[in-house]
Image (cartoon, rainbow, N blue to C red):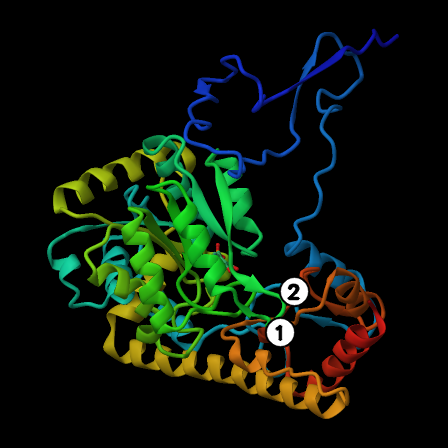
Amino acid sequence: MASTLMPATSPSLQLHSKGKTKLGSCDSNAFLRGQNKNASLKLQPVSRVRMVAAVNVSRFEGISVAPPDPILGVSEAYKADTNEKKLNLGVGAYRTEELQPYVLNVVKKAENLMLERGENKEYLPIEGLAAFNKVTAELLFGADNPILKEQRVATVQSLSGTGSLRLAAALIERYFPGARVLISSPTWGNHKNIFNDARVPWSEYRYYDPKTVGLDFEGMIADIKAAPEGSFILLHGCAHNPTGIDPTPQQWEKIADVIQEKNHIPFFDVAYQGFASGSLDEDASSVRLFAARGMELLVAQSYSKNLGLYAERIGAINVVCLTADAAARVKSQLKRLARPMYSNPPVHGARIVANVVGSPDLFNEWKEEMEMMAGRIKTVRQKLYDSLTSKGNSGKDWSFILKQIGMFSYTGLNKAQSENMTNKWHVYMTKDGRISLAGLSSAKCEYLADAIIDSYYNVS
Ligand SMILES: Cc1ncc(COP(=O)(O)O)c(C=O)c1O
């Protein structure tokens, strides 16, 4: 007979308690320091479960089912739909005009080179492949940027954009206890998870203006100004996700002014270099502008989109410091943080990037392929706009779609309207009204426009 189950659950983090709540070896008050009431450290509703005595009852009984990821969950729902008209505009992954995944030719060539060379599978050092770290920093800052010659950049290969952000978050948590990260409202869904799990307090700055479906620049500046001095300001280097709305070059200057005035630390997330405009240099111009001002900054990089290396998990965290000495110290601590997290990064994607960026022929071919991908997205963006304007007779101005940049378009559809897109039209998208144009073909633009018009006009 099963003895009595005694699950004693207690909140794993008592954020609002006044006493010295301990969580493992971590002093929870440490990350509360410097927080004001607007700062948010939303923790997952996790309970710690203590089973005193249990027979035939799982020790994991107290663990509830986690909600599906709002972005990756969309793909799961799409797969389950049998309707032939279905369209997956949820995940930001590039598709061909036939809506098939695409492996870049330069990637295949780089992989052939690797096979020919018969390279081994030895561990990489904690900081990653040296050839990758060199080219990734050059690609980001420009090969002749003095900050590289002066060895003022700590570059560590990490697990794509997400892993690089997570490593940077761990650095912030350890060396800037209580410092707050400001993130745009809205932002890529995973940013909040990353800072929550790293126990870094965050709050939001205004970014999107629903009235204009454009940038709320005044709000953004005001909120960055109002943040406690020394905050980290998370900025999307280009192709803001989810809105597709980027500041203009003049606005970037103003943003840099305010960040400098307030002694904040810019923290760039660059997940789409080359993919937004088709030009690697243009898409890195925001980061380079800040670096040229002599500012210290953090930059997380990803090769998921621009080289289509989604599953290879290849990216880097770069920390620009005032001195080479500081950069060396930061790098040593990034390695120290990475070691117990994942020990060392995977080699395959790093070799691909090193081969492509490091060879003039492959590099030029990559730029052509990137222009092709960015061009296809621009074409469907224009076609969607044309279809919407020819169908919507109410005179609604859809031109915001053309002003947006990159993979995504923020349609301005609300939750109910987005649900109508999925339930009635089998168009899978996130509930915030974001669609990935990379998953759209020219042939499907008319159908998508019908779905948007119906949802916009017939669902409140
Ligand atoms: C803004 C932003 N940052 C980071 C990432 C990280 O992607 P990954 O971890 O695949 O490199 C993404 C992916 O969609 C993104 O949109």
For residue 341, above or below residue 440: above
How crowded pointer 2 is (Cα within 10 Å; few <14, some 14-19, many 20+) is rated as: many
| Mark identifier at residue 196 | none
Callout 1 touching callout 2 (CB < 8 Å): yes
For residue 24, above or below residue 194: above
Which residue corresponds to mark 2? 90
Q: Position of residue 124 (x, y in %)?
A: 30, 46
For residue 440, above or below residue 28: below
Element on which disc 2 rests: loop
Cα separation between marks 1 and 2: 8 Å
Residue depicted at 53% across the width and 74% down the height = 102
Label 1 is placed on what type of residue? Answer: Gly
Query: Is 412 situated left or right of 188 in this image?
Result: right
Q: Position of residue 9 (x, y in %)?
A: 70, 17
Does residue 159 show up?
no
Q: What count of labels does the image hold? A: 2
For residue 52, above or below residue 109: above
Q: Position of residue 337 (x, y in %)?
A: 35, 35
Q: Position of residue 284 (x, y in %)?
A: 33, 68
Which residue corresponds to mark 1? 439
Does residue 19 show up?
yes
Q: For the view shown, which residue lies furthest in the right direction?
A: 1
Residue depicted at 78% across the width and 70% down the height = 421
Element on which disc 1 rests: helix
